[in-house]
Image (cartoon, rainbow, N blue to C red):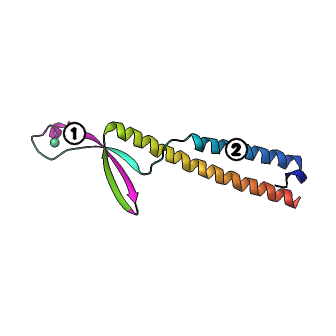
């Protein structure tokens, strides 16, 4: 980039943006596995009048992981430990998307800063 001819303010700005970009990339690198979808805890009444659930002690909890595969909704039942893991990986995916936005925003800011330099 043509940073040599830039005013010192732009150089500092670009350095800061580059730092911000590197920081976001470093965070992407430390991120664990990523999954999409949602995990829901379900408890229910089976409807049998003599069952304990009729008196308030519901069946479950069961954990259901819902996601879309090629436009179709797919449900998978999970045990509690797997549910925790899947939830954490879904959370990682959210973080990854935030980081992608940040990388994109920073790239745009770098472009803008470079433009200012060329026009000044
Ligand atoms: Zn029941």
Name the residue that disc number 2 marks: 20
Residues in magenta, as a range: 50-71
Where is residue 43, by image quadrant?
top left
N-terminal of the pair, mark 1 or mark 2, is 2
- Tell me: residue 31, above or below residue 111: above
Please provide percent x and percent y for residue 81.
35, 36
Q: Which numbered tag is attached to residue 35?
A: none
From this viewpoint, which residue is outermost toward the left? 50
Between marks 1 and 2, how big is the CA–CA gap?
Answer: 50 Å
Q: Quadrant of the N terminus?
A: bottom right
Residue that appears at 12% across and 40% down: 51
Circles 1 and 2: CB atoms closer than 8 Å:
no
Spot occupied by residue 21 in the image (x, y as percentages of width and height): 69, 46
> For the residue with label 2, is its CB less than 8 Å from the closest atom of ligand 1?
no
Q: Which residue appears at 83% of the width and 57% of the height?
A: 116
Q: Nearer the viewer, residue 59 or 85?
A: 85
- Dot 1 corresponds to which residue? 58
Looking at the image, the residue that sits furthest to the bottom is 71
């Amino acid at each position: 980039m043509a940073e040599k001819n830039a005013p010192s303010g732009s150089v500092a700005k670009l350095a800061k943006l580059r730092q911000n970009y590197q920081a976001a990339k470093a965070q992407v690198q430390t991120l664990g596995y990523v999954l999409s979808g949602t995990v829901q805890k379900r408890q229910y009444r089976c409807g049998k009048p003599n069952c304990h659930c009729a008196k308030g002690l519901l069946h479950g909890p069961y954990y259901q992981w819902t996601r879309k595969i090629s436009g179709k909704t797919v449900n998978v039942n999970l045990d509690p430990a797997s549910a925790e893991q899947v939830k954490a990986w879904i959370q990682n995916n959210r973080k990854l998307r935030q980081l992608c936005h940040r990388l994109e925003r920073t790239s745009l800011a770098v472009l803008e800063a470079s433009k200012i330099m060329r026009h000044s």
